[in-house]
Image: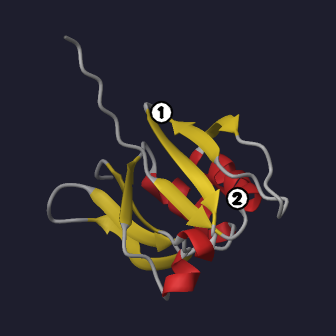
């Protein structure tokens, strides 16, 4: 019997459309599915692909326990993305409202990496090869 398992994070954000545009611009994410809008005008879910990975965006809905980092006072999760040019991705993130938490630099463990908080409160480790 063949088994298939996958894991895709779902980021809870106040405005999935705004977040989708951000991730498409800064990560080159491709929007592959968009669920219909709910009563509040926001899509229930937007699915994206980046390279061989996927992630979804959903609106914050406190009645369901879906809280964004802003609702929680910060993010409890670190998302790591490995890219060819971490500096360029970090610069695009900060140009679009992200905040540098740890500068992108060559690290003693053999990678070039740093952390950025995106405008929606999610924390990203942006990693690539040494320069």
Q: Tell me what residue is drawn at x 50 percent, y 46 percent.
A: 55
Dot label at residue 16: 2
Counting other residues with Cα less than 10 Å from the Cα at mark 2, is it few (<14), some (14-19), or many (20 or more)? many
Residue 51 is marked as: 1
Q: Quadrant of residue 102?
A: bottom left
Kindly check if marks 1 and 2 are in contact, taking CB atoms under 8 A apart as contact: no
- Residue depicted at 54% across the width and 36% down the height: 49
Left or right of 90 in this view: 119: right
Image location (x, y in percent) of residue 65: 52, 72
Query: Residue 89: x percent and y percent?
Result: 53, 55
In terms of sequence position, does the residue under pointer 1 or pointer 2 come before the other? 2
User: Farthest left residue?
Assistant: 109
Relative to the observer, which residue lies in front, 114 or 106?
Answer: 114
Depth check: give the residue in front, 37 or 123. 37
In the rendered image, the residue lying farthest to the bottom is: 73
Report the coloring of the rendering: secondary structure
Q: Is residue 123 left or right of residue 94?
A: left
Question: Is 37 placed above or below 18 here?
Answer: above
* Residue sitting at x 68%, y 50%: 25
**Residue at point 68%, 70% (across, down):** 14
Circle number at residue 10: none
Q: Is residue 126 visible?
A: no
- Tell me residue 80's x, y (percent): 36, 56
Instruction: Find the distance from the CA under tag 1 to the CA under tag 2.
Output: 20 Å
Image quadrant containing the N terminus: top left
The reply to whether residue 86 is visible in this rendering is yes
Measured as percent of width and height from the top left, residue 77 is found at 37, 68
Q: Residues within 10 Å of mark 1 (few under 14, many from 20)?
A: few
- Quadrant of the image occupied by residue 29: top right
Secondary structure beneath label 2? helix
């Amino acid at each position: 019997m063949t088994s298939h398992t996958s894991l895709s994070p779902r980021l809870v954000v106040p405005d999935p459309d705004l977040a989708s545009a951000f991730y498409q611009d800064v990560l080159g994410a491709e929007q592959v599915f968009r669920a219909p809008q709910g009563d509040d005008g926001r899509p229930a879910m937007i699915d994206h692909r980046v390279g061989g990975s996927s992630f979804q965006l959903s609106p914050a809905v406190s009645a369901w326990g879906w809280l964004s980092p802003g609702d929680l006072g910060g993010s409890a999760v670190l998302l790591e993305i490995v890219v060819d040019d971490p500096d360029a991705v970090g610069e695009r993130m900060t140009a679009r409202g992200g905040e540098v938490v740890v500068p992108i630099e060559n690290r003693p463990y053999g990678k070039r990496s740093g952390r950025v908080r995106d405008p929606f409160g999610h924390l990203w480790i942006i990693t690539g090869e040494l320069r």
